Image (spheres, helix red, strand yellow):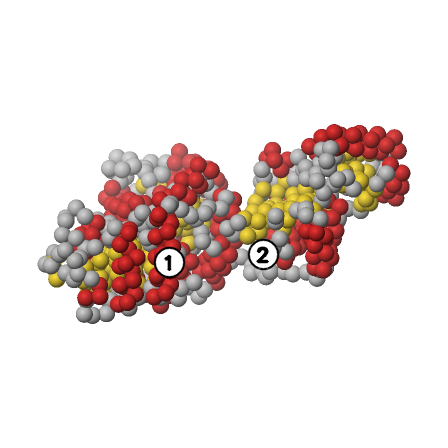
Amino acid sequence: MKECEDLRPIFCPKSIAVIGASRRPESVGQAIFRNILLNNYRGILYPVNPKAKGILGVKCYPSVKDIPEEIDLAVIIVPREVVPKVLEECGEKGVKGAVIISAGFKEVGGRGVQLEEQVKRIVRRHDISLVGPNCLGVINTDPEVSLNASFARSIPKRGNIAFLSQSGALCTAVLDYAQGTGFGFSKFISMGNKADVNEIDILHAFAEDPKTDVVLMYLEEVEDGKAFIKLAWDITGEIARRKPILAVKSGRTPPGAKAASSHTGSLSGSDEVYDAIFAQSGVLRVDSVEELFDCAVAFANQPLPQGRRAAIVTNAGGPGIMATDACIRYGLEMAALSPKTKAKMKKRLPAEAIVENPIDLIGDAQNDRYKIALRAVLADRKVDGVIVILTPQTMTDIEEIARVICQISTRATKPILACFMGVVDISKGVKILEEGAVPHYTFPESAARALGNMSQYADWTTRPRTAFKTFKVKKRKVRAIFKKAREEKRTHIPEAEAVEVLEAYGFPVVDYILATSVEECLKAAQKFGYPVVMKIASPDVIHKFDVGGVSVGLDDESSIRRAYREMMRSVKRKMPKASIWGVTIAEMVKGARETIIGMKRDPHFGPILMFGLGGIYVEALRDVTFRLAPIRELSAIRMIESIRAYRMLAGLRGQAPSDLDAIAECLLRLSQLVTDFGEIEELDVNPLMVLEEGKGAKVADARILLRP
């Protein structure tokens, strides 16, 4: 990871050479040079073009090496084949930072990949911090710098929000949107192909930037999942001046992931992996650029709520109901107002007004009613945040109501989000809200979603901090099992061996015996007591159900004999070349719920843990959640709580709760196992039978695949 000092030549250069500056008005080379020149850049600017004596009245140099002064930043806009030569000259000149606007590199494949690798070698050799190639550029609105080294049409308004994007074209649209809405930025950077500087480096710089309070990201892929988690975890919750990070991660669908990969020529992990990365690092993932900015304006201008209890103040019943539904949908609770709060409002509001939450001031409400209601609910300890809704009636004093909201907001310690519904009639009121730093939304759902995200982030900042728990285990035993498999040239560790691996790491496994005959099966059944489970034991059979290799509920001698005979016949018919070790006879766990824990090693990010509803439901319902290993104790708990079936596990409608602590411990042991042994490619425990609270859990079946 680059130090923040390494990025100073990019964000705060004292001198810039625009290599490829052009006299052609329609060219990117002139657009970038003009943007730097005409936006009050505080440093010294040099155009570089061997075919021009001057550009926009500024003396031009044939090469960066011909510039007599030191150069901090080179902005490069030349044909891709010339880029390596230009970079070499920058290195010889001692240039510290570079932004390559030019495209045609790894995103197009072939020759572009070779050129990008060449670019990487050059910047490493000369210790140049490089943004790009294939990017829009860099913007810093700090008046001490005032830098617009991009081909965007204008520099945005100054603000406290930093934005980084992997898409240059999206940046231009975002900047245009920001200009139209009065949205301000502190820093703005397009990363392009990330040949050198990536999101980790930029986040590190944003973390230490005193001008930045909120970080927004558009990502198509993350270079290093573990490094991202560690850094984002620090920024969002651990540093003295923590900052929320909101991200749009494209490629949720397989076609979208394929398009993202072809866009930048980068690897992309599965969407579930990114959900895990963001969940573990405190990053709020949003689904659209619109939602990104809806949330950003709230984070940038309002205090965080202390909880999830929302109050709604409105002058119309319908929008109040819509807002209520949206609040529940986005994880908020409707605040139960105290009797004192309701009495205070009832005394001063018309008899027709509804003082239950949502509070309906009725259609003829003026600014005085809004003032009464807002002050009352903000003073209520049971309220954590307020959404104020206005629908424009003929008698509504829209601008005065906006002023009242702003005045109250300046003194409030709780967030206030406004929703003035409409476009034309409410426009002057909206302008007052924006000038007063009160977030405004056209519809109640957007306000509720933003407040929900604020509450989610507040939960993250106040969560209990837990460590990476480790257990005393038997590594040598596991190493011996894997060595034996390698010597036998197999990657499949069947159940009989897989449970030994899990036992070595302290997992609770069902009692079982490997039997090679019917007589041994019967002895095992007598030992455990009926009913029992019979499963084929073979290093060649991965999916036992598919070949008739599982029989459950065997409750007498005849059923065991019949099951053994039919199982052997079925497996030999369907897999005649399979090596059969025998069968396992195991106790049948009763009164338990079936869950699944597992791991798949992602080629980009390493071991990804999974938890969900198990048995036959895992494929049908896909009620699962993921995290990158290793996980903290709290992450194990969050994995359990985040599946849809959690309420069932926690005890639903009088049912006894399952042993959630036992599940969490199994997840932590699994995290340690797959972190210790990088040769494990996949691991499934399905089902993990979870008993009632306090009675533990049992591994009922398991399989492990090693890397080829």
Residue neighbourhood size for the residue with mark 1, other residues' Cα within 10 Å, grouped as few (<14), some (14–19), many (≥20): some
* Residue on which disc 2 sits: 630
**Viewer-proximal residue among 195 and 532:** 195
Q: Residue at coordinates 32% horizontally, 53% vertically from top-left? A: 133
Label drawn at residue 706:
none
Query: What residue appears at the point 37 percent right and 65 percent down from the top-left corner?
Result: 125
Q: Let me know if residue 682 appears in the view.
A: yes
**Type of residue at label 2?**
Pro
Measured as percent of width and height from the top left, residue 63 is found at 20, 62
> Which quadrant of the rendered structure holds the N terminus?
bottom left
Q: Nearer the viewer, residue 394 or 633?
A: 633
Q: Quadrant of residue 69?
A: bottom left
Kind of element beneath mark 2:
loop
Give residue 647's position: percent from left, percent from top.
62, 42
Q: Which residue is disc 1 drawn over?
A: 120
Is 251 rendered above or below residue 144? above
Element under label 1?
helix
- Residue 401 position in % (x across, y down): 29, 46
Where is 460 relative to 566, above or below?
below
